[in-house]
Image (cartoon, coloured by chain):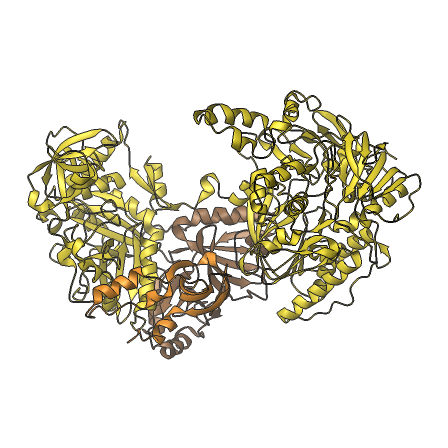
Amino acid sequence: MSGPFRFDGGPIDRSVSLAFRFDGRSLSGHPGDTLASALLANGVRLVGRSFKYHRPRGVFTAGSEEPSALVELRGGAWREPNTRATVAELFDGLEAFSQNYRGSLRRDLLAVNDLLAPFLSAGFYYKTFMWPKSFWERVYEPVIRASAGLGRLSGEADPDSYDKGFLHCDLLIVGAGPAGLAAALAAGRSGARVILADEDFVMGGRLNAETHEVNGRSGADWAAEAVRELASMNRVRLLPRTTVTGAYDHGVYGALERRTDHLAAANGKPRQVLWRIYSKRAILAAGATERPIAFGGNDRPGVMLAGAVRAYANRFAVGAGQRVGLFTNNDDGWRTAADLARKGVEVAAIIDARDRESVAEVPGARIVMGGRVTATRGRHGLKEVALATGERIGLDCLAVSGGWNPNVHLTCHHGGKPVWRDGIAAFVPGDLPPGMTVAGAAGGAFTTAAALIEGHRAAVEALGELGLPADAGDAPGASDEAANVAPFWHVAESRGRAWLDLQNDVTVKDVVQAHGEGFRSVEHLKRYTTLGMATDQGKTANVGALAIMAEQTGRTIAETGTTMFRPPYTPVPIAAFAGRSRGRDFRPTRLTPSHDWAAERGAVFVEAGAWLRAQWFPRPGETYWRQSVDREVLQTRGSVGICDVTTLGKIDIQGRDAQEFLNRIYANGFATLAVGKVRYGLMLREDGIAYDDGTTARLGENHFVMTTTTVNAVLVFRNMEFARQCLWPGLDVHLISVTEQWAQFAVAGPNSRALLGKIVDPEHDISNEAFPFMACGEVGVCGGAPARLFRISFSGELAYELVVPARYGEALMEALMAAGEEFDAVAYGTEALGVMRIEKGHAAANELNGQTTARMLGMQRMVSKRKDCIGNILSERPEMNREDGLELVGFRPVNRSEELPSGAHFLSIGAEAAMANDEGWMTSVAWSPELGHSIGLGFIRNGHARIGETVRAWDGVRGRDVAVEIVSAHFLDPDGERLRG
Amino acid sequence: MIIDHPLLGPRDAQEFAILGDASLIDRPDWQAEDAAKLFHDYLHLRDNPAGEHRELWFHEQGDRSWLVVTRSTLTHEVLKVELARDVAIARGRDR
Amino acid sequence: MAETPLRARPALDGYNRTVGAVALAEVSGLALVSAAVPQGGDEAFAAALAEGLGASRPATGDSTAGDRHMARILGMQPDQLFILFESPDPDRPAESVLAALGGAAYVTDQTDSWAMLRIAGAGVRSALERICMLDLADEAFPEGRVARTVMEHLAVIILRDGADSFLLMSPRSSARSFLHAVELSVLNLSE
């Protein structure tokens, strides 16, 4: 032996030592160890304090069901609380800490809670901390938070990276124990695409923990050989360290692969990968979980599940104690005694709850049939157990087996309800998710032979259903071991508390009390006592608790039923769900063609959906944003400005019926638009509300190009495809997005034509006569580059939009600015764009907010009544056409030096600020550098008839109340002379 | 969720956008006597069946086909997938 | 590409990098034009495609090769195809296709709509399985198969153009985010 608790043999690699620290103490283990096995090998039994009562706790299991041995791993930003020591793979340099104590682990000051236990039973918080109400946040909650709980978060951002991925297979096999390996071999040898996932870092499941033989050799050796064979198959994917956490619709499974948790450092690679697995069929071979028996003091370090004690002995070559006892209600538990005895461990006592003859002779062991353990002793670990007979036996480890529960969890994720099977005293899967079958212990077939046969058969059947050839040979062979479980859940004669849920500190007494207070449903029991609601989800606790509830109510367990299992099977870090979507990678960024050009000139950018747009271009000496914006507006209106408007949605529309299609999509008529002309278009929703607007140009007889607002580009396209395919499938019309194809620049201002004269190739006449307002056409620029020119204006100035293939966008921006130098041309951003459109009275997103009718926008006459179009009929509803309805008009402050409040509501002078007096609201405001005062757009009742009237713009949120005058929405050039000039 | 596209085979629902009830194909006649009522019902009234439900899905990140997906709201089973254009034509919408 | 009066900027500035068993490179110089088939015009389109580009019409989700201009025809939608080719006039590829098809399709230039990135090498499927939800195994996605899908929130057209080679096309405006996503998938591999 290499220490008092470490045996010879086993798969542990003793040629390599791994140094690790626990609570600062230097210890060592070997490759193949978990933190739990290494702690036990070092004789460490006390590993933490419990959630509520701060009871000393140790290692209870050898798997992911562990409720008790929760520790913090690593340090600094990498600190991870509540990690199960039983699944933490040991590596050199691992730092682990116990958790949930004040002072020291051995002398936890908060252990006083345990003395208060009589007052802290089920429902205590609900009943006690109800009043005074104000105490909850200020007193109770902080005190409870400080004493209850588990580990500590690092408080820092997670320094690791995470990834996601997608896998496809014919057959997903969940669990690589005997059933899963037999299934994988059968399917893999037949040539199917197989994914075999197992949460452990060594595949083989219980074969590694037992001494069973398969095909005449040790189960562990057979498993290792099977894994080697599977690894050599290029259509089989092995996913060790991977937990299948959920079963979703249509054969989709979620799985978490831990890729670097077993390494000292991730070296920049993703720590975990969350896989979405698309399967045609799935076999659940998830095995079973042993359950304890509840008795007085059964939470003491040293009390462990019998199968776990066996796993530590056989797989990890670790003795969980030096003088071991067994408390069981089935034959399987006796294997622990036999295996330990074979390793030379003293087996002091076997207490079997069944009143029958002894199962086997174990030399030196006191055998008590029909026995009961009623109490345990030992401050930081087990020293002695007491039996119902009064007999006391000195032990440092008690292995407990109350039978095994099939791991049915994934079968419940579509609502399947497990059914009780008396023969094994356990729940087995009920209705299964489509495409899933269950094999081995997960389905209640507890022997190795049955697991191998069922796994093999399940794979052959799945391949048959898929029409794939099965060339699987025979199932591997093994013996059938007896179990003979007799239901036995708790020791009624217990002295002291008998524990059910070790993680949430729930006892038998709590369940009895819940029943006494009228709770009958297991779902209510769970929520009242918090049983099964900890991070382990009660894997070792639930069935025992509902058996006791059944006992109390006089029903059978089958009648009592189980709680619902939901994903995930074991905890999944939120970071894994987030994957890469953190910080700047949260979503993609869209950049305009002139983005780099603008960035080099110090532009300030604003997010518009996924787009980054230049908001303004500060010049040296400008310290306040409005200085830049005012300059951009004045220079544009005074001479010429250039703005990248590429973000507008652009849709190419072609077909014999393209014109008719547009006529039905837009509320206004498009039947008369001539080739070479552009028209403003207003789209309604089918309910008659204004939806989107833009311009559509006719480039040819059957060829149009539409622009949409930036935000609605995707939705407008979707709606138009719906109209094309579902509403009017007989029209010959075809759509394709060209948003990304073209770089589009607005060139606006009195000198825009002069500037473009230097850019547009001379063979194209862009004079006012040849290319008037609302003209469009294909041109060449800069000596032959392809371009389109539209004479449209959002600013109210003489203006154009010039469009080139996106690859030329940056160069065109440079060319425009160079050509504009003699005119003192200015680049302007979205703020100046917004100011100019408000000055001009153009509606934008603030006005088209989903509440707006064409009438409100002053466009009711545009809605043609002589044709069918989306929204036409319902736009005629009387409420939407009231004579005294809201109308879009302009506003200016009576005191010109005042700033208008955006979002303010309009009230008549003297009216009280109340909903009943609400007359509308201010949608957009801006400082007009041209007018020298604040201006606004807004909707107000009967607005056009009230021009000249003074009302209040009342903003209760910001405490503003401004007298405003109603004016035309067209602050500048109301007759449109500039844009036609 | 997987939608078995009639042209492309099984594709993840992440590639699709859902619109809602397939009855949205049956847009009323704008010149009908009671067009206002018909459009009101068309736009706002929906059955909410426990069981088979016909829904419109758009393969936006795919072949841009609108599909009529018949799905059980009880089991999530996808029972049938058709091209919405074919459904619309079968209902005479191309005339 | 022919001399053009304005400087053309590739969407990914000519990106080219090999990491381990995966090579990533921007593809530039290829033209991409969509061709929509008029209602009732399927036969005329098939004839024009054979005549003008020496190609047969692929089913949606498949592609075919033409014997002129190195053309590959991608079946994108039931009534819409993409033509990937070396355009004789790089500045007016739609007109080249229009000339080749003689009006049997409505054509639209898509060359600048999509950044094109070729990902190739032995590790290509391991990298793509981190961002691509499609099954890219030989039996499900053989050479010549094409699909529009979504990767890391972005639209992507994926064409398998070799045993271990895929051409990825994603919208130009978000090309840098797309490249970052693909590059990270390659860098994230443990190998």
Any idea which chain is the orange one in this picture?
B
Left or right: where does residue A596 sit relative to residue A430?
A: left
Q: Is residue A366 visible?
A: yes
Q: Residue at x 38, y 56 (%)?
A: C113
Q: Residue at x 64, y 22 (%)?
A: A112
Give above or below for A184 relative to A45. Answer: below
Give above or below for C100 relative to A269. Answer: below
| Farthest right residue in view | A363
Corner quadrant of residue A597 = top left
Corner quadrant of residue A261 = top right
Between A117 and A179, the one lying in front of the other is A117
Instruction: State the image coordinates of residue A619 (x, y, percent, origin top left).
Output: 27, 31
Q: Is residue A761 visible?
A: no
Any idea which chain is the yellow one in this picture?
A
Any idea which chain is the brown one in this picture?
C
Instruction: State the image coordinates of residue A195 (x, y, percent, origin top left).
Output: 65, 57
Between A839 and A574, the one lying in front of the other is A574
Instruction: State the image coordinates of residue A413 (x, y, percent, origin top left).
Output: 57, 54
Give above or below for A720 relative to A245. Answer: below
Q: Which quadrant of the rendered structure holds the N terminus of chain A?
A: top right
